[in-house]
Amino acid sequence: MENPFELALMTIVSQEYVKKHIVHGTSRWVASPGTMEEVVSLVRLASEYGKSVTPIGALRRLGTLFKDGQAELWIETERLCSIIEYSPEDMVITVGAGMRLCDLQHELLKFNQFLPVDPIGDVDETLGGIVATNAWGPSRALYGTLRDHVIGTRTVLANGDVVRTGGRVVKNVAGYDLTKLLVGSFGSLGVMIEITLRVRPYPTQRTVTLLSGSVADVDRARAELMDATLIPSVFECVNTSLARTLTSSPGTHGALDTGSPLTLAVGCDEPVEGTAFQEGVLRAWSSSYSLEILTFTPEQTAVLWEDYHMTLRTAATVLRVQGKPSTLIEIAGTLLAAVNQERMWLSGCIPAGVLRLFFAADDDAVALVTACVSHLTACGLSLHYEKLPTDHHDFPSVSQEIAIPDSKQTVHRLIYQAFDPAGLFSSTRLGGA
């Protein structure tokens, strides 16, 4: 006997775009609407049948950035992938939430523009998924996160209403900015179907310089850079294991010949004159602090960052550590001294005060993650998982990830109740909001 809810789904989006997906041994309906009207109909149908809803992009971050296997209907936005409006002169573009980041960048490059975000994940992730998780990478040091680039959305709320937040011009907010509320809300407040983005001119050239040395010397260079007038496009700290992997590519000029635990990657998105000035300052610091220095041409830089993302997206587990920019190098140094750094990759965005630890899917992963969590917890740091294997029961829990002040939890609950009084969407994923 056919399930009446499933039949109703097929009436809205046709049988071709309704499927079952198994998560943690439980099947869920996945519907892929192709229009705004179909999204509205799906939300209203779920409300009518009392089914919980989770918006998803292309199933790339499923089960990694959130733990939400209980939703009974997943609304997949992958088919909402068109360019709705693009004004290269104003550097503003509106696209469907299902457009892939790689496709967007390809279209923008035709006008020598780009969206300056580089989240660590699959190359074919959708913008809706990236915006919902506020994902970011090394470019955050200069360009910020998607909160700084999303200027408007069109979103379907739990009651089926379609609302616009922000607008299609850069200066569009009067009063509370609901757009920033949706960025990083993990789909807990509605289904984003359109996103309006502010884009940037593509840099004249992009280069990077690596500085490697002891924890103390790298930290001195970090302090100098934070006080200097230089404007690095990337200000990333990586461990030697990751640095060696990245610099051993045939597209670069040889692996780092160092036993030093840490390396600073300092990027520059300036014309030739600006690049030469920044490299000169970094060379002076490398001499003062006995740091090994390695500079990359624009071509080598492109290869390095491509390898960076290709390497880190293979990790099965990602642990995020939140600290202070001024103490990030020290934290990384004490951690690497306490555990076997050859079994993991470390990458930290200095201006954001965020370290990420990447672990491969091997037999030693649980023990290594446990050792890292134990050490970092003893330091009183805030931790949470950004990615976990499907079977993650043996991994240590991270109590700090739910340690949200009561006042903030109250605000979260009130926001969620205002957007979704019936509880159609998952309230367990409200952390980003």
Image (cartoon, grey):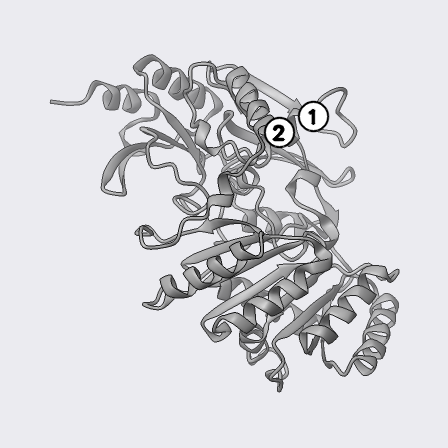
Q: Nearer the viewer, residue 384 or 73?
A: 384
Query: Which residue sits at x=86%, y=66%?
Result: 274
Q: Quadrant of residue 89?
A: top right
Q: Can residue 149 be seen here? A: no
Query: Which amino acid, by three-letter code, is at mark 1?
Result: Asp
Quarter where residue 214 is shown? bottom right
Residue ID for mark 2:
181
Q: Residue 340: where, in percent of width, then height?
A: 47, 73
Residue 21 in picture, x, y percent from top left? 28, 39
Image coordinates of residue 87 in percent, x first then y, are: 72, 36
Within 10 Å of disc 2 (Cα), the crowding (few <14, some 14-19, many 20+) is some
**Quadrant (top left, top right, bottom left, bottom right) of the C terminus:** top right
Q: Is residue 381 left or right of residue 374?
A: right
User: On the image, which quarter does residue 423 sit in?
Assistant: top left
Report whether 382 appears left or right of 46: right
Name which residue lies at 85% across and 60% down. 227
Q: CA distance from mark 1 to mark 2?
A: 7 Å
Instruction: Look at the numbered disc 2 and give the secondary structure of its residue.
Output: helix
Would you place residue 345 above or below residue 109 in this image?
Answer: below
The image's mark for residue 177 is: 1
Query: 10 Å neighbourhood of mark 1: few (<14), some, or many (≥20)?
Result: some
Q: Position of residue 229 (x, y in %)?
A: 88, 60
Q: The residue under label 2 is which amino acid type?
A: Leu
Residues under numbered marks 1 and 2 in contact, where contact means CB atoms less than 8 Å apart: yes
Asked if residue 342 is positioned above or below residue 70 in the image, the reply reads: below
The label number, if any, that marks residue 297 in the structure image: none
Residue in the picture at 44% in, 51% down: 387
Provide the secondary structure element on which disc 1 rests.
Answer: loop
The answer to whether one can see residue 329 in this image is: yes
